[in-house]
Image: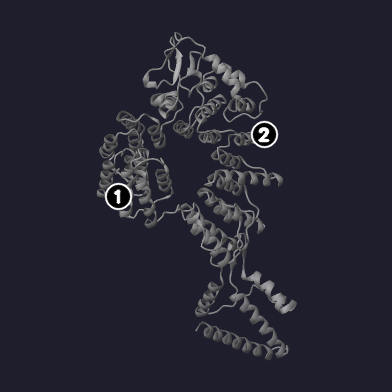
Amino acid sequence: MAKMLRSALLRSIFTRNTSAIKCAAASSNVCPSEQAHQGRLRFFSESVTLTRPRWTDSNNTRSITSDHVHEEDTSDVFGDYSRKFSSRRTFHADEEDAQLVEKFKTGRTRKNTTYWYFLHCKRLIKEDKLAEALVLFEADMLKGERLQPEEYNYTVLIGGCGRVGYLKKAFQLYNNMKKRGIEPSDATYTALFNACAESPWKQSGLVQALKLKQELLKKNIPLSAIAQHALLKTAAFAGDLKSCFQILWEMLQNGQPITQETFHYLLMSCVKDKQHGFRLALQVWHQMLRIGLKPDTQNYNILLRVARDCGIGEPGLASALLLKRTEEGTLKLTSGRKSQVKAQASCQPLDMDAFEHELFVDTHTQRKRSVQNRHVTQDEIQMLPESSNGSLTYQSQSSHLPNLLDPSTCYSGVVALGPVSSASDRLALIGNLEGFLEKMAKDGLEPNIKTITLLADVMEAGSQSVQSLINVAKKSGVTLDETFFNIMIRRVAKAGNLNGAKSLPMVIKSKDRGLIANAQTFCSIALACRKQKDAMQLLTEMESCGHLPNTHVYSALISQAVKRLDYAYLHELLQHMHKLQVPPNDVIIRQLEFAAQYPPSYDKIDGFRGFYKQWLEFMPGQETPHPWEKYRSPKPETEQDGVTSQNQVSK
């Protein structure tokens, strides 16, 4: 129907123009055939102007009108003769004709722009729909509408891949970007370094980040402070403290500021050293204070994480490094080569030579110093009270207990560190709950939910600790969540107090009625089920509360049975898993393999071995999903974007 209407319209226009030409020819000296020729030219010129749509180019930088299109097209079709006729003449059709033309224009107009795709990809990424954003870009924008992408289209997707650690896709997009001749921005490089940092394989991520850094150095592309911090984050998450120092040197040489964020990553690198991490973190902390930087809440939270996960190393070496007088440390820091760049808000330069020498200390030399510090008679020293966990040895005339968060309290009255074996011991070195929160208050900071949750993980388990933290949260206006109470339950359960672990959910209901026990709550209680009857009762209670036992709950129960080599307990758990058809994961398989092989001469193990082999045959296995599986496109990645990718990460 639309074609018929358009044909009728064109015949009507042609008839009117032919009639007008004949009338004009009758009253003029112009040859009728030439008049007809001019009329036909005018008609075609006006019809092109009428039907050529207005459209916007993919860059949104200019609008091309039908007039400009007409000037280019008619010169090609009709030659120079057509220039005599104005390209801006417009044919005035009636209302019906105008509607038809508008319909024709809509069919020819491009639907979306590159910026439209940028906004929609950004929205999908914020909604945790990275896979949909990638399909929108690669299938709809590139293949469907064949738009030429811009830098921001790639950067927003690389940033989305970076936040979830999808390293392979991030560098695939980067390679395709370069092959299209699109210049990456500093935001692009920052997103790539962040993808390296968040990769599930930290060492591979660091290798890829260093390769990218070398590529940029060859191209003489400088890195901004934000990109340098993303690179520093990659080295920190990989636990490579020496690489962190190399990046820190480069930041200082480039005149980039040293901020609290810089020390976030230096502290994070200490977390990876499980043996000496706490001592290293305290040294980094002292250096931060020396250059005049006030810690923020994130710094305090990371330090608590180090206290939870890392040891202090050899006590003698830690004593020599952490308990020296403030004046001695200042003199040491002012010696050696200094950087001329000062830290932000600091009146002291950051002496990288001295800082690096303190962290990567010669252990043989420092061990001699620590032995000399031990030559103290029993009359001159005494241990701290039991409430302080015996973590410090100090002279009897000193009554004030030092807090290693404040180097000024580490005076000569402290002789040596005592045994520091648990997280609560390490918390005692930084003031226990009261001293830690007091130091935060002096820096103008309030604890947040993460601070209180980490404190719950390092304090001694017990109802008094729970009540103390509940009071702190109430005073600071922090709303406690399920994670906090689950951690407290786990701490009590690990101590073997099953009744105490089960009573804490009642505390949850009484203190915060909006909180209810979840699967993680029962998983924490399972750590206290050292007997078979306790485990079966817990599984029954869990089902009565509407929660089906999952692999994490069974893994916690299996760990208790394996510790005690209770094969009857294991047999019952495996039968229960089969009854509910809960597939074992790789963690459970490793636990059971250990139980089936150790000890070889144990009398009761042969029956379990036979049952375990049969159980494996009729139980479905649960494969651990690949970290990138849910973000992958269903199509082969080598065919996406119309470009074959090279030099991608193998994993």
Tag 2: residue type?
Gln
The residue sitting at 54% across, 50% down in the picture is 159
Residue 394 coordinates in the image, percent (x, y):
45, 14
The residue sitting at 42% across, 25% down in the picture is 425
10 Å neighbourhood of mark 1: few (<14), some, or many (≥20)? some
SS for dot 2: helix
- Along the viewing direction, whichever of 116 and 331 lies nearer the viewer: 331
Query: As drawn, is 451 to the left or to the right of 352?
Result: left
Quadrant of residue 10 within the rendered picture = bottom right
SS for dot 1: loop
Q: Earlier in the sequence, mark 1 or mark 2?
A: 2
Tag 1: residue type?
His
Q: Which residue is mark 2?
A: 253
**Can you see residue 108?**
yes
10 Å neighbourhood of mark 2: few (<14), some, or many (≥20)? few
Q: Which residue is mark 1?
A: 547
Residue 165 coordinates in the image, percent (x, y):
52, 49
Quadrant of residue 236 within the rendered picture = top right
Query: As drawn, is 522 to the left or to the right of 406?
Result: left
Q: Is residue 356 above or below residue 555?
A: above
Q: Do the numbered discs 1 and 2 sit on residues whose CB atoms are within 8 Å?
A: no
